[in-house]
Amino acid sequence: MTAPAPTAAHVTGSPAAAGEPVIRLDGLTKRFGSGADSLLALDDVSFEVRPGEVVALLGLSGSGKSTLLSLLDGLQPPTSGDGTVLGTALARAGRSELRALRRRIGFVFQQFHLVGRLSVLENVCTGALGSLRGPRLGLLSYPRAVRERALDGLEQVGLAAHAFQRADTLSGGQQQRVAVARALMQEPGLLLADEPVASLDPESSAQVMRLLARVARERELTVLCSLHQVDLALSWAHRIVGLRSGRVVMDVATEGIDRATVMRLYEEVAAESAEGMAAAVAAGATVARHPVSASALVPALTKGD
Ligand SMILES: Nc1ncnc2c1ncn2[C@@H]1O[C@H](COP(=O)(O)OP(=O)(O)O)[C@@H](O)[C@H]1O
Ligand SMILES: [Mg+2]
């Protein structure tokens, strides 16, 4: 199959500008520790994400991606600055407000975080726990409507045939698709994903990213997904926000952007350290100079789903 040129078209066209931003950050700062040994993990981060936007958070290891995602999920408070997510002010919200916020945010982790000994279907059902009272033990302890919705979700991610298998018998790519179905059980107003394909092979990565693009499009879901591969970010997202040492160093729409520009920006991001440069090269930053080595992910992503 001849792959079309990589564009963000398979996510969807840029969403309408209408509506309050789902995420609004103004000078968000996070410092770990205090005194001379403290570490500034997020430094004056400001940007907005509009409803339906699919944004890649691009940065090398240690640039602050996971910290930012955990702040957005209300798991830790900012040190200073303002952040509003789905209308909740992160710095001012109390515990119960933050819990309520988390129920409206789906989160997909790099390591899937499924319960391996439980069935695939029960894992998906756990996504509804936030809206159910009391603990659940066993698949039949979930209301029938939840089980049916979970099965529908598994169908959407192409894994209904595996519903009654133990989750740990699935491949990594399949487990991540189950994790996506689990996150969707919350009917989230925002989906956050922290390097969801970092531990997957290229084909599984492409499948998971295609799935995220499809659910974003079908549900008009706002998605913020951290990645460290330039090609992937460019071919998948509407927009790329680049982090370096906790600072936003790039905020560009992917539509019509010159690929070499992103690569150059990213190389500048990475050139901070020799280690960073090596990571940038591994992430595909040499593609601009050697087009034949373009990541296998890009053509794979443009296949229909
Ligand atoms: N709980 C923590 N305590 C102290 N330092 C932390 C903590 N979490 C992250 N950091 C530091 O903050 C910086 C950003 O980390 P992180 O957000 O995990 O980056 P990324 O996800 O981009 O790899 C790193 O220097 C990391 O060591
Ligand atoms: Mg991380």
Image (tube, rainbow, N blue to C red):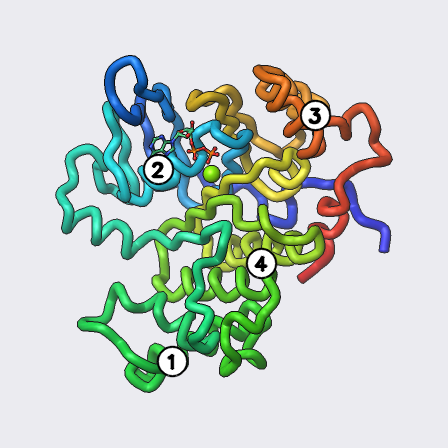
Of labels 4 and 3, earlier in sequence is: 4
Task: Name which residue type carries label 2.
Answer: Ile
- The crowd level at tag 1 (other Cα within 10 Å; few <14, some 14-19, many 20+) is many
Judged from the image, the secondary structure of the residue bearing numbered disc 2 is strand
Query: Mark 3 sits on what residue?
Result: 258
Q: Is residue 265 above or below residue 102?
A: above
Q: Nearer the viewer, mark 1 or mark 2?
A: 1
- The crowd level at tag 2 (other Cα within 10 Å; few <14, some 14-19, many 20+) is many
Task: Name which residue type carries label 3.
Answer: Asp
Checking the image for residue 147, the label placed there is 1
Q: Quadrant of residue 157?
A: bottom right
Q: Nearer the viewer, residue 180 or 114?
A: 114
Query: Mark 2 sits on what residue?
Result: 23
Query: Where is residue 204 shown, x and y percent of the image?
Result: 66, 57
Residue at 54% across / 75% down in the picture?
155
- The crowd level at tag 3 (other Cα within 10 Å; few <14, some 14-19, many 20+) is few
Q: Is residue 269 above or below residue 75?
A: above
- The alpha-carbon separation of the residues under discs 3 and 1 comes to 46 Å
Judged from the image, the secondary structure of the residue bearing numbered disc 4 is helix
Query: Mark 4 sits on what residue?
Result: 211
Task: Name which residue type carries label 1.
Answer: Arg
Of labels 3 and 2, earlier in sequence is: 2
Of labels 3 and 1, earlier in sequence is: 1
Q: Nearer the viewer, residue 220 or 90?
A: 90
Kindly tell me whether residue 265 is visible in this rendering: no
**Rendered-image quadrant of the C terminus:** bottom right
- The alpha-carbon separation of the residues under discs 4 and 3 comes to 26 Å
Q: Is label 2 within 8 A of ligand 1 (CB to nearest ligand atom)?
A: no
Query: Where is residue 295 shown, x and y percent of the image?
Result: 75, 41
